[in-house]
Image (cartoon, helix red, strand yellow):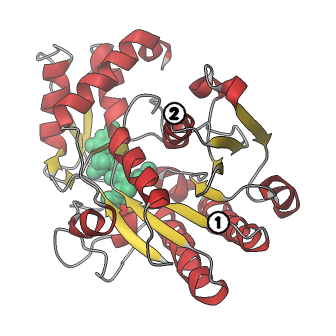
Amino acid sequence: MVSKVLVTGGFGFIGSHIVEELLRKGFQVGVLDNLSTGVESNLAEERPRIKIHRADITDLVTLRKVVIGYEAIYHEAALVSVKRSVEDPISTHMVNAGGTLNVLKVAVESKIRKLVYASSSSVYGNSQSLPKKEDMRCLPVSPYAVSKLAGEAYCSAFARVYGLDTISLRYFNVYGPRQREGQYSGVIPIFIGKALRNENPVIFGDGTQMRDFTYVDDVVKANILSLEMETDPGEILNIATGTPVTINLLADVISRETGKDNLKPIYEKPRPEDVYASYADITKANSVLGYRPGVTLEQGIRKVIDWFVSTGIYARQR
Ligand code: UD1
């Protein structure tokens, strides 16, 4: 049984939720983060119980020292924005593909027993059919998607070549508390922040594009199961809800749940790097891990609104 776990990107949005749950389950937890997008306040209460390594995954020498003594790794550290990857594909590649290669290399050297990799639904791109299944051909459209697919391919190669036990979880549009509003953030915090400030949401395209919005607690659940269950080395699984939601519907739900029915979307031209429709078949995660999503969009959105209101964070945005 594994007891010491390292979470790269542990001060980030998804990483910090994984850290909390690992602590709740009695694991000894280390957090590796360069604090470029993660913030220490995400784990303010847990701080005394975690070992903090302020380091960068692109720094192989430091990484090698940090990993010593850990038995499992959750690799969540990444530059997570599609938009940012279009503006700066080189950094996205260096961190997401190169950084993942470094983490895998030191994982092999330190005889890590399991490595769970945060992959992304973006790897599918505009694939032929829906819902997206793990055995479909990946046709990534953005540099971000390419970098995530490269990391995943490295995980599979390291499983085959070095016998490292890896599992890649293809997260579908994760949202939840601690996901901050900003130019590189996902649509949900952007729409909620705007609604709370009485600003109209901006929709890129006609709003009929679909996404499979997955609440962070469900993603955490899948991550914990990935450590607890025996899985085939190099395994790849979709982690989602399986329910498509249009951006128009999302805007409606958010204006209703914030009580701002007066706000109406402003339509702008679609983003060229955008995938049109993305939702998952989650049969494989269910059969391999016993994974079942538990949070509906309305429930999740309400929790995020409560978090925005409790922190007052929306008032501080532009
Ligand atoms: C993509 C990936 C996702 C990844 C994420 C990381 C796909 C299918 N999904 O998310 O797996 O984790 O990047 O950043 O590739 N939108 C608006 N108005 C806004 C903001 C967004 O209309 O103000 C639209 C976008 O054009 C898009 C949808 O909302 O159609 C979702 O956008 P976003 O939340 O940025 O995520 P994805 O690009 O889908």
Where residue 191 appears, as percent x and y from the top left, is 30, 29
Badges 1 and 2: C-beta atoms under 8 Å apart? no
Q: Residue at x 21, y 60 (%)?
A: 279
Looking at the image, residue 126 sits to the left or right of residue 237; the answer is left
Q: CA distance from mark 1 to mark 2?
A: 27 Å
Q: Which residue is mark 2?
A: 24
Where residue 232 appears, as percent x and y from the top left, is 45, 78
Quick one: 302 or 208, which is closer to the camera?
302
Quick one: 88 or 129, which is closer to the camera?
129
Q: Mark 1: which amino acid? A: Thr
- Furthest toward the bottom, the residue is 161
- The mark nearer the N terminus, 1 or 2, is 2
Quick one: 214 or 210, which is closer to the camera?
214
Where residue 208 appears, as percent x and y from the top left, is 13, 51
Disc number lying in front (1 or 2) = 2
Q: Residue at x 53, y 57 (%)?
A: 85
Q: Which mark is residue 100?
A: 1
Q: Mark 2: which amino acid? A: Arg
Q: Residue at x 12, y 15 (%)?
A: 262
Secondary structure beneath label 1: helix
Dot 1: within a 10 Å radius of its alpha carbon, few (fewer than 14), some, or many (20 or more) residues? Answer: many
Q: Which mark is residue 9?
A: none
